[in-house]
């Protein structure tokens, strides 16, 4: 009987059915090569989703060409269920999930079968050596002879024998034997050792064979012990728990103890961090405890390394510890028992483009049910959604309210920018309070962090005569001035142009910078404190993991006195000598047209404030803003997260915003503004017939043109208690009808739970 298989391809499509040769040992989760196309076949890498005996309705059925990667399963059944949930919940296709879940080298495509065969990823190989006989005593006469006549050969043979006993394996990687090739070749010619080529063995597998690793766990304070005990108790009743710990309270120490216990049981651990940059300092810290057990995984690693890691995990039987960004959620950990989502509030866990626009934290919570593991969410400023779930008993809950080592939280001061200007106390972009404290910190040989949430020299330039501001020709935004390159750049599409010598509109005056970014701040600090060494961290200066690692290491070693940066400097960094943090323009954070603006401002200000005084002395934080009485600023100064949460939740409940409703945002894009809004009105009318007043819009977003395409948005609110699954089922029908109708040339993007 002919077998059939539903194959998933890395396209925005569902699965397709292919015929399978009877002698092909095919299973779900395996990778295969298949031809696909209407006019001309292209050979794709697909994943076997289902094997069955039901022929499809199509007249011409294409066949699976061959198995890939030695018939190794790239997905477990539990992972398949997770992929299906992601596709269903985030209103995308399974093929789109495959595109972001698998490393690029694992899914090549080609115009013919032979080219696809050549493109198939093949793991790196290495040389292996073994004793010529399993009975080591038979080699003793040779040892005695070599010790007298050829000491270098004796040393190499002895080392091979020791590793064979120590690792309890016959074949030893050549790289572990520190001897010249000529020496080893001579031993092989004498028939004392043998060699072969094989797939490269991971160092962690070799270390595992040496016996259980004795983890050097950090000592916990009594307060941390209580918090850890509460977490363990909560995991008995709740698969997900929230750890709310103030900055510097030692949440990572609790993570480490839970990780060690899970690894000792042979379970896998996945630790998610919001930013790739954060993996640098964290991995170094974890490697001091777990050594080579730590596996980093994120998009800045080379494609070859990501692919090798994925395949290594496919064949692992447990005891893996992966630290990575959101994409690590899709790794094939077969015995996953613990997921840790550090800084769970961070918006970086949400993927914006391409589809699926998933939220890694929410997917991790769902994985606890699908994969049967436990998920720990940790933050000093939790998202209001997680906070609500913890307060209502849906999640377990534990707190850390004291800083590790007993150091008090930093003293936070608010400096009124308007009053400073009126009194003539403002110099450059620094109020008197901040200038004095920077000078005092530098005099004490302590370090300073300055946070400004804009990169570049200035956000825009303007003609003082006619008021003209250069804008991006492809996006509806002003161009940012970068002084180092003397050019204007668009931070949306990458367009850039040299700074004009005169106003392009009136030709009367040169353009003047307005506002300030991190680049201008660095220049002004050099004038105010010429003796201070500065280090700048933003996307212009730190654009790779290596550059970030160098910058962090340099600041840790004291090679810079002042660290100036954007949000890069606010998350998870731990510097012992930082006594002062300055926040230059808090107003930018408070007045964003977003219902999450107050929550985000509190989180960001509290997080950056937490970088001060993390060792044996109390730090100081100076927040410069024009409205010190603003409720968010006041609660940051008081360190009162609960008060902020109560106020925000009351307001959101009144207007039915998360966590009291689910949001789905529809973004339409087209090069013709008039056609776009006809399409937006049509879609709005279509959806309003099904959802009524739950649908808002269409509206024009703040930035209504990006890369030569105009944008329009609609927002759907689904109240708590309503069936989200039913709503998504209706939406799939309506979206399919819209895309097949008169406006099929309009790009329509769906974002579930937009951030």
Image: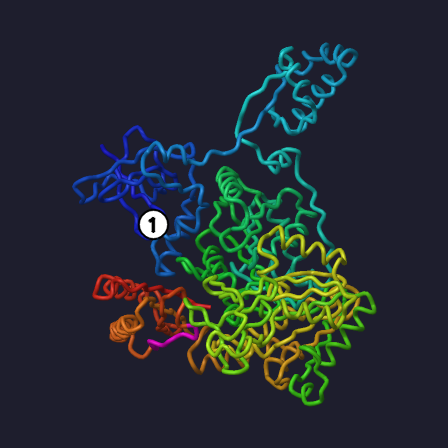
Residue 696 drawn in magenta: yes
Check the image and name the residue furthest to the bottom: 422
In the image, residue 588 above or below residue 146: below
Residue 211 placed where, x, y %? Answer: 66, 35
Determine whether the residue tagged by mark 1 lies in a helix, strand or loop: loop
Check the image and name the residue furthest to the right: 444
Q: Which residue is mark 1?
A: 11
Side of 39 relative to 390 (left or right): left
Check the image and name the residue furthest to the front: 508
Residue 116 placed where, x, y %? Answer: 37, 35
Which segment did they paint magenta? 695-703
Side of 728 relative to 416 (left or right): left
Side of 571 relative to 108 (left or right): right
Residue 154 placed where, x, y %? Answer: 73, 17
Residue 183 drawn in magenta: no
Check the image and name the residue furthest to the left: 59
Mark 1, Cα crowd under 10 Å, few <14 / some 14-19 / many 20+, is: some
């Amino acid at each position: 009987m002919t077998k059939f298989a539903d194959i998933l391809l890395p396209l925005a499509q569902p699965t397709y059915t292919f015929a399978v040769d009877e002698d092909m040992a095919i299973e779900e989760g395996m990778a295969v090569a298949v031809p696909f196309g209407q006019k001309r076949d292209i050979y794709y890498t697909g994943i076997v989703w289902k094997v069955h005996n039901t022929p499809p309705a199509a007249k011409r059925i294409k066949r699976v060409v061959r198995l890939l990667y030695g018939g190794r399963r790239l997905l477990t059944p539990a992972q398949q269920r997770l992929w299906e949930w992601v596709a269903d919940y985030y209103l995308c296709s399974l093929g789109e999930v495959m595109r972001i879940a698998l490393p690029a080298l694992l899914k090549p495509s080609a115009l013919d079968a032979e080219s696809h065969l050549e493109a198939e990823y093949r793991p790196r190989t290495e040389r292996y050596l073994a004793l010529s006989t399993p009975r080591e005593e038979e080699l003793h006469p040779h040892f005695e002879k070599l010790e007298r006549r050829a000491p270098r050969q004796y040393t190499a043979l002895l080392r091979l024998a020791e590793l064979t006993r120590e690792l309890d394996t016959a074949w030893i990687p050549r790289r572990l034997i520190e001897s010249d090739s000529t020496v080893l070749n001579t031993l092989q010619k004498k028939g004392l050792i043998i060699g072969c080529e094989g797939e490269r063995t991971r160092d962690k597998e070799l270390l595992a064979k040496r016996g259980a690793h004795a983890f050097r766990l950090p000592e916990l304070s009594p307060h941390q012990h209580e918090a850890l005990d509460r977490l363990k108790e909560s995991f008995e009743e709740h698969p997900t728990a929230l750890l709310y710990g103030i900055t510097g309270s030692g949440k990572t120490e609790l993570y480490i103890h839970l990780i060690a216990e899970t690894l000792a049981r042979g379970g896998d651990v996945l630790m998610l961090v919001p930013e790739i940059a954060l993996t640098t300092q964290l991995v170094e810290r974890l490697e001091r405890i777990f050594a080579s057990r730590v596996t980093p995984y994120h998009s800045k690693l080379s494609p070859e390394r990501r692919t090798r890691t994925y395949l290594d995990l496919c064949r692992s039987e447990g005891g893996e510890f992966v630290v990575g960004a959101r994409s690590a959620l899709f790794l094939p950990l077969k015995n996953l028992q613990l997921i840790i989502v550090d800084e769970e509030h961070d918006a970086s866990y949400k993927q914006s483009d391409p589809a699926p626009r998933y939220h890694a934290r929410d997917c991790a919570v769902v994985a606890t049910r699908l994969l049967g593991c436990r998920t720990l969410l940790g933050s000093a400023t939790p998202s209001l959604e997680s906070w609500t779930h913890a307060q209502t008993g849906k999640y377990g809950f534990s707190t850390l309210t004291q800083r590790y080592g007993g150091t008090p939280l930093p003293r936070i001061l608010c400096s009124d920018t308007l009053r400073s200007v009126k009194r003539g106390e403002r110099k450059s972009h620094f109020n008197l309070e901040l200038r004095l404290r920077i000078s005092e910190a530098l005099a004490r040989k302590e370090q300073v962090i300055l946070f400004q949430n804009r990169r570049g020299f200035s956000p825009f330039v303007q003609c003082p005569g006619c008021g003209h501001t250069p804008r991006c020709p492809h996006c509806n935004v002003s161009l940012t001035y970068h002084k180092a390159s003397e050019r204007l750049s668009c931070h949306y599409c990458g367009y850039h142009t040299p700074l004009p010598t005169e106003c392009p509109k009136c030709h009367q005056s040169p353009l003047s910078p307005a506002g300030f970014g991190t680049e201008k701040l660095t220049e002004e600090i050099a004038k105010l404190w010429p003796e201070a060494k500065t280090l700048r961290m933003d996307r212009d200066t730190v654009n790779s993991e290596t550059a970030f690692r160098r910058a962090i290491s340099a600041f840790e070693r004291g090679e810079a006195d002042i660290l100036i940066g954007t949000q890069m400097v606010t998350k998870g960094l731990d510097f012992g000598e930082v006594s002062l943090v300055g926040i230059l323009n808090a107003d930018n954070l408070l007045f964003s047209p977003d219902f999450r603006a107050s929550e985000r401002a509190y989180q960001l200000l509290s997080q950056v404030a937490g970088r001060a005084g993390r060792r044996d002395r109390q730090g100081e934080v100076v927040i410069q803003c024009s409205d010190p009485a603003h409720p968010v600023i006041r609660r940051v100064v008081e360190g009162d997260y609960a008060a902020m949460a109560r106020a925000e939740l009351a307001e959101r409940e009144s207007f039915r915003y998360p966590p009291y409703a689910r949001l789905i945002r529809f973004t339409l894009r087209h090069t013709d503004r008039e056609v776009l809004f006809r399409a937006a009105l049509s879609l709005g009318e279509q959806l309003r017939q099904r959802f009524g007043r739950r649908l808002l819009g269409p509206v024009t977003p703040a930035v209504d043109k990006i890369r030569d395409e105009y944008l329009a948005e609609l927002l759907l609110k689904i109240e708590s208690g309503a069936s989200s699954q039913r709503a998504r089922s209706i939406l799939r029908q309506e979206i399919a009808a819209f895309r097949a109708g008169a406006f099929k040339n309009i790009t329509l993007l769906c974002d579930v739970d937009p951030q």
